[in-house]
Image (cartoon, rainbow, N blue to C red):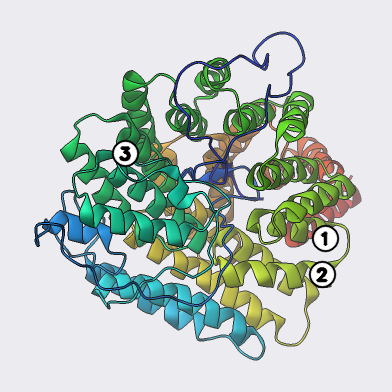
Amino acid sequence: MPPRTNDHAPESGRDTGPAEPTGLSGPSAPSAPAKPAEPATPQGTTDTRPGTGDRADARTGTGTRTEPEPGAGTGTRSEAAEAAARPESGTEAAGPGPEASPSGVRMAALRRFSAAACRSRGTHLTVCAALLAVAMTAGAVAVGGGRDGTQAGARTGADAAPAAGALTAGALAGGDLDAGVRALQSHLRSQPRDVGGWASLGLAYVEQARTNGDPSRYPQAERAFDRSLALGSGNEQALAGRAALAAARHDFSGALKYADRALQQNPYSERALSSRIDALVELGRYDEAAEAADTADSRRPGVPVFTRYAYVRELRGDVRTAREVLERALDGASAPADVAYVATALGQLAWNQGDYETALTHFARALAADEDYLPALEGRARAQAASGDRAGAIGTLEQVVVRSPLPGPLVALGELYEARGADGDRTKAADQYALVDAHAALARAGGVNSDLDTALAAADHGDPEAALRAARAEWDRRRSVHTADALAWALHRSGRSEEAFPHARRATATGYRNAAFLHHRGMIERATGHDGDARRSLTAALELNPGFSPLGAREARAALDELEAAR
């Protein structure tokens, strides 16, 4: 599974002061939350947990149109207010903040996405029609087409942070994100100087981008946060929102900067504490991430912090503690969004260790809490494939990519088509890989750094040199185990295995147990003449998680057979 951040981690939104510690940071076993998690707020960071990276959990429906905006109470409104309060505003509209990209760039990305989608054949046209609908949403926003690009019925199961003034958290309390956005827009038309309202709208746009797979929402979020900061310089809610936005765009240095600024204003900001952990993890600063997780646990114990605490432990090879923390978090979870999120995290942890039966049990519990939670559906598909249910896995992943055409599930579905090898499957697989590249173009047009996704997909299913350029660029920005693995694999696939070797070793140096990393390391060791090491790495990959990838596992087995034959 691809790298994961906590894109889907619910938050309580209550940053009122210290909470009772739960003991996660102490020498004793982690204790359960003292009370059930309260309604959650959307948290717009990218998902670094393998298997949920940049995933959506939206319930989709038909497009809706917003009613025309009336003027504010005085009969006028600022250009910035109009730009940020209307989803249909063109990205070229003036606002208080800079644009991520000109509309021409976004339209070029749209054309690439459309062309890739339209190549599909047969029943697969249904999937690509939905993917094209997402692209058209971005296009409508880019050209100011006057249509609300949101999808009716999209749900997060999480409340937005409460706006200041007349608007309260109740606007989003029902879990209907689109209705909440409309309520915020209406409120801001009448109260355009509501600092908290603009920050809440920015967070809602970040959440829409994540759940609908529509990165064109990010520039709108940026304008809303900038408007909030212009009205209330240094306000913590907008700074924490900017941290979430930066993380969603994979600007983790920026996320850390904004999180630190928010925490200077409010040391108990759950969103800022969580974003700070995410940023340090993604930057590869694991010791600091562990300290940040301990600090967050002491200040704001709850589901968002517990899941991050567990992931930091998993990255250091402490799977037992990670599992215990997640189990205790699940025991204390009551809201469906919390149950779905934590159960999915447990399922991903079990899948990563090759325990597919347990993984399927956790994914089933997540889907019982929210039947449309896409990370759980994707996790179930991967566990189905690893358990031998390829048909079930393909059917489930087709559901996922219809709703959220993101690189992880697109590549997984393409590889399952390749592994099945039926008539037309090669074309279907190629379509998925083409959509990965097209989606990356759309993401870049929304200000998202997509180099890691590009490197991982292109190394196996595209241009190795393009993969290497993307991997080097990402390595220059951040040096995590995931970027080390991506760079190592891109170097190897480009015929530079000697240069790849130290990066492959670095990817496994923290103790993180990941079969894909071990597979890559084993293939690189074999290419550099370290046959004994290669046998150990490839054997470890298949013993840990024999179904980590339909094509990768097949390659690992074939390489092992050849190594054994050559002894």
The residue that appears at 66% across and 44% down in the rendered structure is: 341
- Tag 2: Cα neighbours inside 10 Å, few (<14), some, or many (≥20)? some
Describe the element under mark 2 as helix, strand or loop.
Answer: helix
Q: Position of residue 151 (x, y in %)?
A: 48, 70
Q: Residues within 10 Å of mark 3 (few under 14, many from 20)?
A: some
Q: Is residue 521 left or right of residue 430?
A: right
* Residue at the image position 60 percent from the left and 14 percent from the top: 20
In the rendered structure, which amino acid carries the disc numbered 1?
A: Gln
As helix, strand or loop, the secondary structure at mark 1 comes to helix
Coordinates of residue 372 in the picture (x, y in percent)? 66, 61
Q: Amino acid at mark 2?
A: Gly
Q: Is residue 207 visible?
A: yes
Alpha-carbon distance for marks 1 and 3? 46 Å
Label 2–label 1 contact, CB within 8 A: yes
Q: Which mark is residue 6?
A: none
Q: Residue at x 44, y 82 (%)?
A: 115
The foreground one among 57 and 462 is 57
- Decide: is 353 above or below 120: above
- Judging by the rendered image, the residue that carries numbered circle 2 is 392
Q: Nearer the viewer, residue 42 or 509?
A: 42
Foreground tag (2 vs 3): 3
Query: Which residue is the site of mark 1?
Result: 384
The image position of residue 179, as x and y in percent, is 44, 61
Task: Measure how far apart labels 2 and 1 are at the Cα level.
Answer: 7 Å
Furthest toward the top, the residue is 27
The C terminus: image quadrant: top right
Report crowding for label 1: few under 14, some 14 to 19, many 20 or more residues within 10 A (C-alpha): many
Confirm or deny contact between disc 2 and disc 3 (CB under 8 A): no
Q: Which numbered disc flags the more N-terminal residue, 2 or 1?
A: 1
Which residue has dot 3 on it? 164
